[in-house]
Every structure is written in structure tokens, then in C-alpha cells.
Amino acid sequence: MMYRPGIGSRSTLKETRSMITDQASANQSKPASGQEPTNVERRSLIGAGLAALLTAACSSPTENGAQRLSSSGLATAGERDDGTDDGRSVPNDPFIILLKGLYQPVPKGSVQHNFGLTTVDLNDGSYSKTRIYPIFGIRGSTHQDKSIGTFYVSLATGRCVYDLPGGAIAMEFIPGGNFPVVVPDGMGGQYDEGYLPLTILEATGSYRAFAGGHNHMVDKLHQLVAGAPFAGFPSSGYDELCFCMIFQRSVPSFP
């Protein structure tokens, strides 16, 4: 799965991944900490990682600070709070969401539709799902502890779907991803830490402008049974903690 790096300096993005990994490890690597992080711990993790992510999103050597903020579409906290939950508000570019929770298989034929998408078949029996939480840029979704949608992924097809308020997005993993760090959890499992790039195949509703864009995942996946990453997925137990930074445009791969 390859990946095209992008916005922001090489050092800034390396620091971002390091901050997320270090902060999450501090919260989750204790032998007795097999349970999911508390709200305080999760917010601490979010605070440590997203400052650098947002800096990277706004960085450009050819624009001044005000121009970068305007052209990136990043809204202030007050502007985000003015949004509604009716699904009609256009998300920021980029926006950031968190995938969190145990993956569950999606039985063949159990999904009533593909959310208007034509490049995926959620009924083929190869997909698994977990929950989506808002972090930045989904207007009207200001409660980070409240799930706003469902994430579907298929290792067989290399494709995934984000079912979000006001629309859905289909993506495909591309070359360049890596899980270079595997940390034992002290309870017979492990944390698979890495990053994955995706290209956006199609998008509906409020997300139509993101078709052809890019998603950068920064992942700390808790594999409950140690072994090769993704072995026995999802039935052997996989608890997700993954930040997704989603752009309208295709960007060069991150270092």
C-alpha cells in the first residue's frame, strides 16, 4: 500500500507520528491497561497529535499564515460550533476523524445498501466495521465522545467506506503504508503502530468535493492476539485507534 506524502515539512510529520505513538503508548502500554483509554487519556492523545497535524495541513513555503488558514478551509472553534447536525454543512478541507473500537464482521448480505456508492459492495461478506468519532472539521459534530458514523474495511478488496453525517466516502489503500513498530501489550497481544495512505474513489452528499482526494491514516491498532499484523482479522480481536486526515486534493506522499 503506497503513499504519497505531502503537506508540511518532513520533520513536522515525523514529529506528528512520534507524538501520537509516544502519547498512546504512555496511556496503553501498562500491563493492566488492556481496557480502552479513558476520556481524559483520549483527549490527551488527541491534543498531543493534532496540533502537529493541523500545523502540517496549514504549512506551505509560498503562503503567509493568514493565506494558508483561509485557503486550507480550516475553521475556528466558533465557526465549527455554528454548524448543525442536519448533515447539510460542508466539512472543512482537510477534516480529521478518529476510528475507534473493536472491529466486527459484516455478514454477507446484511447491509441494506452501499450508501449510494458504486465502487464497493458492502454485502460481499469481506467487510468489517468500527465506529467513527469527530475530531476536527465536521461542522455541528462538536462532541468527540459521540460516534457520528461507521467505518467499513475489507482486507480482501483493499477498499473501505466512511458512512458520515450527510454522505459517504469510498476509498482504496495505495502503496506506501507501513507498520514499522510492534509493541507487546503485556497480556498476550500487541500494538501495531504505523500509517496508511488512501485515495478517494468517490464521495456523496456533503463530501462530493473530496472525490479524487487523499486520506492519511495514523494508526495504533491493538491486536489482542500477538502475531503477524492483521492475522485472523477481525475474529481474533482488533481494537482500533486511528486518526484519519482527509483532503479534497491528492497530495504527495508523506515521508
Image (tube, rainbow, N blue to C red):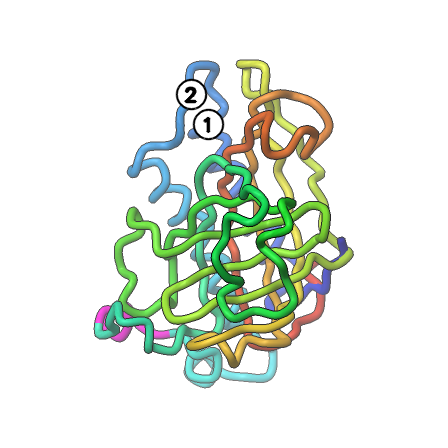
Q: Main secondary structure of the magenta part?
A: helix
From this view, report whether residue 236 is shown above or below residue 145.
Answer: above
Q: Is residue 78 magenta?
A: yes
Depicted 219 relative to depicted 162: above or below? above
* Residue pictured at 65% horizontal, 67% vertical: 119
145 versus 41 height, above or below: below
Q: Residues within 10 Å of mark 1 (few under 14, many from 20)?
A: some
- Labels 2 and 1: the sequence-earlier one: 1
| 118 relative position to 52: left or right | right
Residue at the image point whose x is 53% and y is 63% from the top: 114
Tag 2: amino acid: Ser
At a point 50% along the width and 72% down the height, the residue shown is 58
The residue tagged 2 is 33
Q: Position of residue 111 (x, y in %)?
A: 50, 53
Mark 2 and mark 1 residues within 8 Å of each other at the beta carbon: yes
Assess disc 2: are there few (<14), some (14-19) or many (≥20) residues with their C-alpha within 10 Å of its C-alpha. Answer: few
- Numbered range of the magenta stretch: 75-81
What mark, if any, has residue 28 been given in the picture?
A: 1
Residue 254 location, x and y as percent? 68, 60
